[in-house]
Image (cartoon, rainbow, N blue to C red):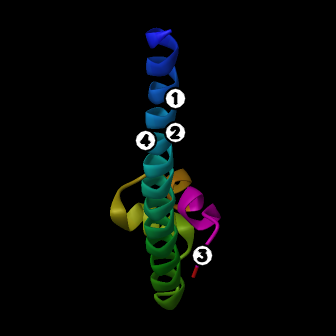
């Protein structure tokens, strides 16, 4: 019987850890979405296309198109 009690405790402990992890992930996703929104706004303000910005930054334009695809929370 003690093993069953320990198993239940571990499940509860795991659920608590999972809840904490989900809160951290959601918070990080919100930060990422806000950064992506700011990035896109600045790109548009400067009048740069995705390709032009990629060329200036020396990165692949796919990266910028992926940033523009982020669902914004702002």
Q: Check disc 4 and report the residue beneath it.
A: 17
Is label 2 in contact with label 1 (beta carbons under 8 Å)?
Answer: yes
* For discs 3 and 1, the disc positioned in front in the rendered view: 1
Q: Position of residue 31 (x, y in %)?
A: 43, 68
Q: Position of residue 72 (x, y in %)?
A: 61, 73
* For discs 3 and 2, the disc positioned in front in the rendered view: 2
Residue at the image point whose x is 43% and y is 50% from the top: 20
Measure the C-alpha gap from mark 2 to mark 1.
6 Å
Crowding near the residue tagged with mark 3, few <14, some 14–19, many ≥20 C-alpha atoms within 10 Å? few
Residue at the image point whose x is 54% and y is 62% from the top: 67
Residue at the image point whose x is 46% and y is 28% from the top: 9
Is label 1 in contact with label 4 (beta carbons under 8 Å)?
Answer: no
Q: Which residues are magenta?
A: 65-73
Check the image and report above or below for 72 versus 29. Answer: below
Crowding near the residue tagged with mark 4, few <14, some 14–19, many ≥20 C-alpha atoms within 10 Å? few
Q: Check disc 2 and report the residue beneath it.
A: 15
Q: Position of residue 68 (x, y in %)?
A: 59, 67
> Callout 2: helix, strand or loop?
helix
Q: Check disc 3 and report the residue beneath it.
A: 73
> Callout 3: helix, strand or loop?
loop
> Callout 4: helix, strand or loop?
helix
Q: Check disc 1 and report the residue beneath it.
A: 11
Residue at the image point whose x is 44% and y is 19% from the top: 6
In magenta segment, residue 20:
no
Residue closer to the observer: 43 or 74? 74
Residue closer to the observer: 4 or 38? 4
Measure the C-alpha gap from mark 1 to mark 4.
10 Å
Q: Earlier in the sequence, mark 3 or mark 2?
A: 2
Quarter of the image where the C terminus is located: bottom right
Measure the C-alpha gap from mark 2 to mark 4.
5 Å
């Amino acid at each position: 019987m003690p093993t069953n009690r320990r198993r239940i405790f571990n499940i509860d402990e795991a659920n608590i850890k999972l809840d904490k992890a989900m809160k951290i992930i959601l918070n990080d996703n919100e930060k990422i979405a806000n950064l992506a929104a700011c990035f896109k706004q600045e790109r548009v303000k400067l009048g740069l296309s995705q390709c032009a910005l990629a060329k200036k930054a020396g990165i692949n334009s796919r990266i910028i198109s992926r940033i523009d695809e982020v669902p914004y929370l702002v």
